[in-house]
Image (cartoon, grey):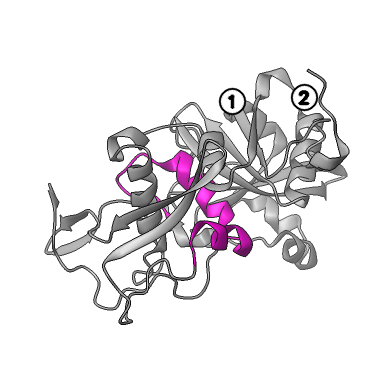
């Protein structure tokens, strides 16, 4: 049962030490499609400043009013969204904890407040149970998202597009349709956070780094997962370049072949359109669209 008006944090703050994708953990609401985008934007300080103004939540100051303010995109313009800071909590044993999305730092409230603001913007929590990551990207940035069905492309082409997109600061999410295969979660959105070509036993492997917005649970358990024996063949210098992290934080590596087998679609989200479909954003001033 959800309970209201219970103190669950003694010294809340909006941000404890900036924002990163590792801040974001999904809670009881089915908002993985939204959080997969929000977590990637967390690595982009300028994008977060556009969404969350400097005076968004002045808790601890004489300007604090119990309201959180952010800006979301609708019909070609930024819309101011305000919500109170009464967040849904649940009783776990004898302790009240956040029911919805949260930060990995218990004092940090920006993730929870953004989920509530997004839900209000969409008409309530019931309206954000499931959705397309590309729609969330547009709402958060005003950018353009393209949905790619994996069955309609080949591995090399898709890998090249995703590598180019990430190098340009774009955001990529992917959907897993089937539950329980080597730790993957079905009907769930993941974020692609990196690419790397590795030479392993005289073969070139295309690897992808993915993150589950569940955070501390729900990682891939197949080849090149955190505990895979295959990492024993990789030098420390290469692992450093790849930023291999064996913490249980929701982020993991897998081959492009496994990705093509277990995921069904990719959303490539650009801040401006990719007219030639090479994964790189194209300047609007350099393109003319004939209708």
Residue beneath the point at 88% across and 44% down: 202
Vertical placement of residue 155 versus 199, above or below: above
Q: Secondary structure at mark 2?
A: loop
Q: Is residue 27 visible?
A: yes
User: What is the x, y in percent for residue 81?
Assistant: 39, 51
Location of the C terminus (image quadrant) = top right
Tell me which numbered mark, 2 or 1, is placed earlier along the sequence: 2
In front here: 199 or 128? 128
What is the number of the mark on residue 104?
Answer: none
User: What is the x, y in percent for residue 53?
Assistant: 49, 64
In-image side of 20 versus 253 (left or right) = left
Q: Is residue 102 visible?
A: no
In front here: 238 or 37? 37
* Crowd tier of the residue under label 2, counting other residues whose Cα lies within 10 Å: few below 14, some 14–19, many 20 or above: few
Residue 121 lies within the magenta run: no
First to last magenta residue range: 25-53
- For the residues labelled 2 and 1, say whether their Cβ atoms are less than 8 Å apart: no
In-image side of 76 versus 4 (left or right) = right
- Distance (Cα) linking label 2 and label 1: 13 Å
Vertical placement of residue 213 versus 105, above or below: above
Residue beneath the point at 73% across and 62% down: 239
The residue pinned by badge 1 equals 264
In front here: 4 or 288? 288
In front here: 246 or 114? 114
Q: Secondary structure at mark 1?
A: loop
Residue beneath the point at 51% across and 61% down: 22
* Crowd tier of the residue under label 1, counting other residues whose Cα lies within 10 Å: few below 14, some 14–19, many 20 or above: some
User: What is the x, y in percent for residue 32?
Assistant: 44, 42
Residue 26 lies within the magenta run: yes
The residue pinned by badge 2 equals 154
Residue beneath the point at 85% across and 30% down: 288
């Amino acid at each position: 049962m959800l309970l209201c008006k219970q103190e669950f944090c003694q010294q809340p703050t909006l941000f404890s030490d900036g924002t990163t994708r590792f801040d974001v953990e999904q809670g009881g609401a089915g908002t993985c499609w939204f959080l997969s985008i929000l977590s990637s934007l967390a690595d982009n300080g300028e994008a977060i400043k556009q969404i969350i103004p400097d005076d968004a939540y002045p808790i601890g100051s004489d300007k604090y009013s119990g309201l959180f303010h952010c800006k979301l995109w609708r019909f070609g313009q930024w819309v101011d969204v305000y919500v109170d800071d009464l967040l849904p909590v649940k009783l776990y044993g004898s302790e009240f904890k956040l029911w919805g999305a949260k930060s990995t730092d218990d004092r940090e409230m920006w993730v929870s407040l953004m989920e509530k603001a997004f839900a209000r913007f969409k008409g309530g929590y019931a309206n954000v149970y499931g959705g397309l990551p590309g729609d969330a990207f547009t709402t958060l940035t005003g950018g353009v998202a393209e949905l790619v069905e994996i069955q309609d492309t080949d591995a090399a082409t898709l890998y090249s597009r995703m590598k180019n997109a990430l190098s340009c600061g774009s955001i990529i999410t992917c959907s897993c349709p089937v539950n329980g295969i080597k730790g993957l979660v079905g009907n769930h959105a993941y974020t692609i956070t990196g690419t790397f070509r590795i030479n392993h036993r005289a073969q070139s492997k295309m690897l992808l780094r993915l993150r589950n917005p569940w955070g501390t649970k729900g990682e891939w358990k197949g080849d090149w997962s955190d505990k895979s024996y295959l990492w024993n063949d990789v030098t420390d210098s290469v692992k450093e370049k790849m930023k291999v992290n064996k913490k249980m934080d929701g982020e993991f590596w897998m081959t492009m072949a496994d990705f093509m087998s277990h995921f069904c679609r990719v959303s490539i989200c650009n801040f401006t359109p990719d007219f030639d479909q090479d994964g790189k954003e194209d300047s609007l001033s350099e393109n003319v669209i004939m209708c």
